[in-house]
Image: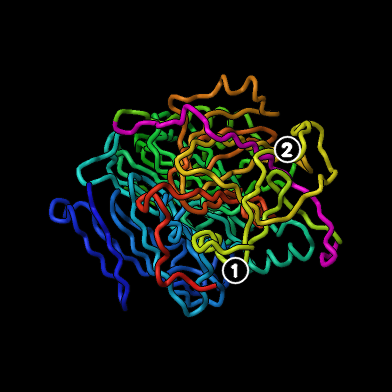
Amino acid sequence: MARTITFCWGSALLFIYFVGFFLNSGEAAIKTYQFDVKVTNVSRLCHSKPIVTVNGMFPGPTVYAREGDTLVVNVTNHAKYNMSIHWHGLKQYRNGWADGPVYITQCPIMTGHSYTYNITITAQRGTLWWHAHIFWLRATVYGAIVIMPKEGAGFPFPQPYREANIVLGEWWNNDVEDVVKQGNKLGLPPNMSDAHTINGKPGPLFPCSEKHTYALEVEQGKTYLLRIINAALNDELFFAIAGHNLTVVEIDAVYTKPFTTQAILIAPGQTTNVLVQATQAPGRYFMAARPFMDAPVSVDNKTATAILQYKGIPNSVQPVLPQLPALNNTAFALNYDDKLRSLNTAQFPANVPLKVDRHLFYTIGLGINPCPTCLNGTQLTASLNNITFVMPKIGLLQAHFFNTKGVFTTDFPDRPPTSFNFTGAPLTANLGTKQGTRLSKIAFNSTVELVLQDTNLLTVESHPFHLHGYNFFIVGSGIGNFDPKKDPATFNLVDPPERNTVGVPTGGWTAIRFRADNPGVWFMHCHLELHTSWGLKTAFVVENGKDTDHSVMPPPKDLPPC
Ligand code: C2O
């Protein structure tokens, strides 16, 4: 569809659709939303506290759209915290200005100010989500994005009778920013959350939670589509429903070859759509989410529950819990990830780059740095290729667009400074982590293969890596050290899963490929907020193409000033 949108700036936004407006009216639409960021009192786990919300809702409002629509979301910040909202998984083609990560693509929306995110949804449909992208505020500021297929297009799987969003999160009894400050003072991880939640509610296994339990009513014999989102800050989660299998049909807004499983694994940032058939004996069944943690770090086995309730069954019926894989069930996790395959049909092809222009190899490391201001004299840190990312003071996209010098460098190394037995015995020695706002420059439309290699610096751990502005194909992964001679022969270049967030296995590696066809500055980071805040992040500068149609658009006039 040929369509041009012109932005005219005055007191209001004016959209003029030129070509195709009359032909396509009723198809592509403009959907407007007002997001008021404000502080709201919420009580959970016998504690009541003020939290930052959007429109007073926790979780925040669901954003609905159709493929091809333009979303116009005006965010007004009434809270005392600076704010920015990220539209996780939306590609924002040429328009990083609407992506949201603070100091990467914009400066924060300050108290009393507004910013309008203008997003055109191109060739994407499915479940994504939005969240605050500034410090740990996403703990309470998040919600679902549901993109329906184009009018009349339908799903490539049996049409469900109804659908529901299942947004998994975490809850702290104390103010999250205080919890983080406390951790930073000690140079240690902040206290872990007090509960996991399903649609903001912990469920009856937690105190004072009877009325804070989400229930989904189902009718016998019908099929339901669940859009499951992991909005937790620091935990990969298993999710299952007692007595009911789940058929996975989509991950990160990309259709998959359907497969049936007792439980799913979902990392922070990821989404998974499943079909559930209400064909069991009418009753009440727990849905449950509990962490997957196979690293020798702190243990968190708190289980959030919600209820799948057959119509007409009284609340007095006691639900049963599903069998969730054990907390450290690595075999289940690897086997589950192995089953994920792109649908790869003529209509929804998996366009895997077969030839690679640029090979990147990034090691993921944790470490301990001296910290004179920390109570213990040291602080935990994290790095990629031994570089701890330092947040700039102005948005990187702005610096890139206006060619402002001195904000970042483009010398992020393609490989780690030294090679070592990455996943051998634990290395407590600090390899001399360097700090810097160093980015990697990528030629427009080149194909990139990135191998993310976990290391045993301090400890191995699994890391869900998220790339902004793109989907990528997960062509391979394994345990131990990546072998550039042998491993590429095992890559799946036919129907690998396509996602925006991938869990790099504990003590292992993952290889991803993508075509750099979206110019701009794109953040890439571990989606465990703990690790992001320790510096486990970097960004790609994808250069412009030859003409303006393949170059970064000019910034909107209301881009928050730095
Ligand atoms: Cu969902 Cu940069 O994050």
Q: Magenta stretch containing residue 423, yes or no? A: no
Q: Residue beneath label 2, please? A: 455
Could you say where residue 505 lies in the image, as x and y percent from the top left?
A: 63, 35
Q: Is residue 459 left or right of residue 287?
A: right
Could you say where residue 410 lies in the image, as x and y percent from the top left?
A: 62, 51
Could you say where residue 42 lies in the image, as x and y percent from the top left?
A: 52, 69
Q: Residue beneath label 1, please? A: 47
- Which of the 4 image quadrants contains residue 50? bottom right
Identify residue type, mark 2. Thr
- Which of the 4 image quadrants contains residue 292? top right
Q: Magenta stretch containing residue 353, yes or no? A: yes
Does mark 2 have its CB less than 8 Å from ligand 1? no
Alpha-carbon neighbours of circle 2 within 10 Å: few (<14), some, or many (≥20)?
Answer: many
Q: Nearer the viewer, residue 430 or 552?
A: 552
Viewer can see residue 470: yes
Identify residue type, mark 1. His
Could you say where residue 489 lies in the image, as x and y percent from the top left?
A: 57, 19
Q: State the extent of the magenta-drawn residues as a range.
A: 347-376
Disc 1 element: strand
Viewer can see residue 241: no
Q: CA distance from mark 2 to mark 1?
A: 39 Å
Disc 2 element: loop
Q: Nearer the viewer, residue 498 or 285?
A: 498
